[in-house]
Image: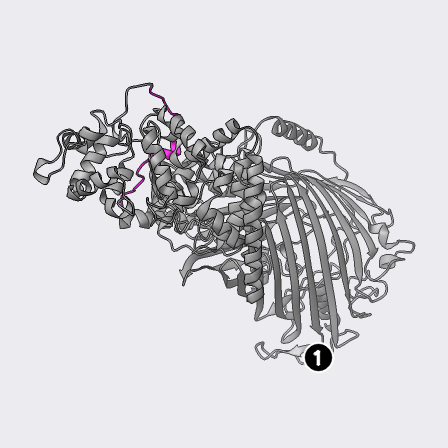
Amino acid sequence: MLAIQAEALIASMIENVPSKRNNLFTCLRYWFWPILVLVLVSVGATVEPPAASALPSFARQTGQPCGTCHTAFPELTPYGRQFKLTGYTAGGTRCGNGSAETSETQVPLAVMTEPYTFTHVASKLAQPDNNNYSTVQQTSLFVGGQLYCNLGAFAQMTYDRPGVTFSWDNTDIRYANTVTIDGTGIVYGITANNNPTVQDVWNTIPAWAFPYISSEIAPTPGAGTMIQGTWAGRVAGAGAYVWIDNIFYAEFTAYGALDPRTLTTLGVDPTDGTPRFAGAAPYWRFAAEKTWDKNSLMFGTFGMYADVQPTGGNPNGIPSALTYPSNIVDPFLDIGVDAQYQFIGDINIFTVRAAYIWEHQRLTGQSNPNLAANSAAANGMTFANPNDELNNLNISASYIYDRTFSFTAQYFATWGTSDALMYSSIPGLGNGTFTTGSPNSSGLTFDLAYLPFSYGGPPIWPWLNARIGIEYTHYIKFDGSTNNVDEIPGLKASGNDTVFLYTWFAF
Amino acid sequence: MRSSSLGLVLRTAILAVILPSVAHAESGGSSLDGLRAKIEYCTDCHGEVGRGYVGWYPMPRIAGQTTEYFENQLRAFVTRNREKDIAILMYKVHAVTPGTRKALAAHFAGLNPRPYGGGPKELVERGRKIYDEGVPDANVPACSACHGPNAEGFESNPSLAGQLYPYLVKELTNWTKERAQEAPSETVAVMTPIAAALTKPQIKAVSAYLSSLWPTRRRLEVETVNNSSCPPCILPIPGDEVVLIGEKLATGNCTWCHGASAHGFATAPQLAGQQPQYLENQLRNFHDHRRDNPLSRLYMWGAAAKLDAATAHELAAYLAGVEPQAACDGDEQLAGAGKALYDEGIPDANIVPCIACHGPDAQGVGNIPRLGGQSYPYLKRRLVQWGEGFDASAAAPMPRIAGKLSVDQIEALSSYLSFVK
């Protein structure tokens, strides 16, 4: 029992790498999509188009081109942040007699798809079955925009081709309003969302940080802090925020873990080994941003606390009962600091982003008074240390030319306390792929993208938006090793280097 | 404190020395070029072809004026015997050499553009009667006796035909204060009791009549710029309902980019307290793609695409009523030089004072925008863009005036204005 709990808990720090060495699907050639891409690009290049936006339903609502809210989507401009903070409602006509044209109520629906992607992993050791792989990645349906008056939504339902799952994805529903107190403009609002940081408006913190799109096929490092997506889609949170004088941002949101039945209904697998947490987990965010003309500079901090509970799931794929272990919790604390600078010129755009997250994991198996004490085995979790720390650093810079060509370079690193049991090579513990007990990984990512429709799509569908790009990831260290990575003799960290070609459409 | 104000004085002094001399060099060349530049300088304030212009101060029609009166007035300004109490430094802006004075008088005397118009039509008939017959009961003689049957003037008696309605009303109402000053000339002395005897309704009537006249000789059509065709640009005071709808619309749309209190955000300018007629005009310009600088294309063309005139009116009424806030983001060291430029212009370089149209506190009027408190980069960008040829169809004189400003001058002006509350 304890071993199962431990394994499950380990998964809280270890992102699943479901496709790492799975038998991959047969290689399919999607000639249809590449041809469509070429046709659309050539049409878009020859005709002066009307406006479009990254989420096309936003464009239809606001009449604004993509470039108003995005430098190169999904990165936000100050106006994009403002649009989100004011509840996705700007330009909306669905609000009784206060609207410009009450008769015109646009439908807040949009589709996003990644119709063709190609992944090449450097070493056959890393992907023995097939290290060149092309596939459709996810396709999402969005409800995006004003729902009614001050209520707006960004809600995503995703069909994921490689994972063959249909599930709810990033969702942020908010009510926002503005008030002027003593001449100072204040935006205030409430948000209901399903992923800590998905409600944030800067591209520094996990949900919206670079890389914006990744191969679902290629191997990725195993260790990450809990705020880096562990809870995505598995929690529901309600929070309140204020945005004062276009400078100060403060937010507090409380999250609760969804029960397995609800998760199943929403298309999320409750048995995949991802943990849950007990009670309410607080998330906070403070930021100060100075915006002057074409520049903006932000410094912020964010964090989350959760009483992490292991699931009854098993990361090695052995299904088990969906019972959560009694009153055992391991308190996790994440504290992050971040900064972003943007220069948005008429033609040249430059962005620098940085975020550092420090995580403290208390692994002694605390007895939680809020949970029924129905287990005697309150202590004795099988980790090497009573306390582990994990750090994550993500620094990236982008240059964007005419909102059409984007180049981004990123340095990323994860490092922390070595824990021979948490980052274990022993089958049955952890996911059994770390070699040295160290969680450390680091590397560089380069992304070159072409965004042909930033100023508007082809006449037949002016709201089409596209990002076609190539992303190269180089690993300096992978899962604690530079050689014999993941216990595979001869596999260097750079053997996991990945070239990822993607197409990304929204309409 | 001491050092910074000393620095300010120094920089102001340096600029004051450099700016005119540089500009002087630019306007050099042949005397004919100099005269052309000076004529343009006159029309920057007095409107296309000297037909007059309604800014913060109504600028009188100088086209078709008698040469003698024209020269007399230029002299009167320089000797501080006319309008010495208003904020424009008349004695500075009108200072020209005697030769230039004569040449300008001759040039404008020969012009006959379409009157600026805008006087109340219903008063014309009544005004005509007063003009032709006087007001015998009040001992007011017929105006036509001195100004001529067609009001085209004679020697030192000015032409009044086509003169601006608000200008005539202002002069006749304030005659004693503005005109009957030290060393009054004979003509001024004649007018003093007449102006005093006229009642306010009589002044309005006779002004309306005169403003409607267009002498028949060599008429000159002036291309009417859309923006400047709305004298006297006074909107009805908006009702509560209009403001309320405007507020809903603005908070749902404009404040997204222009800031929660419309005080400006990022590249989007402050709209709070802006002149409503100006806002309406600009929204129309965005809608019709006349305002075509890159940021306008990117943001405002889409934003104004579906705006109808009534909605624009409601938005403007609301935004005009929001308390503005000075951006204060300019260079304090340059503010002194900027103020000097704003208040006085640089007559030697044929740069008119901004105050003439935008008002003593840069608050704007009618279709002339409030500049006070606007953000430095926005002001700078607009002034630079005019020089680059963007927004060419903007309110008549601005592209030309901005085109004459050096980068240093633009920075000084923008700095100063960003601090004006």
B259 or A311: nearer the viewer: B259
Q: Amino acid at mark 1?
A: Asn
Q: Residue at x 64, y 54 (%)?
A: A341
Q: Residue at x 84, y 64 (%)?
A: A425
Q: Residue furthest left?
A: B137
Q: Quadrant of the N terminus of chain A?
A: bottom right
Q: Which residue is mark 1?
A: A379
Q: To which quarter of the image does residue A46 belong?
A: top right
Q: Verify whether residue B226 appears in magenta.
A: yes
Q: Verify whether residue A391 appears in magenta.
A: no
On the picture, is B153 further left or further right than A2? left
On the picture, is A398 further left or further right than B146? right
Q: To which quarter of the image does residue B161 belong?
A: top left
Say whether residue A204 is visible. no
Q: Chain of mark 1?
A: A
Give the class, few, some or many, for how many residues have Cα within 10 Å of label 1's Cα (few <14, many ≥20): some
Q: Magenta stretch?
A: B219-238
Q: Position of residue A21 (x, y in %)?
A: 80, 51
B321 or A415: nearer the viewer: B321
Q: To which quarter of the image does residue A199 belong?
A: bottom right
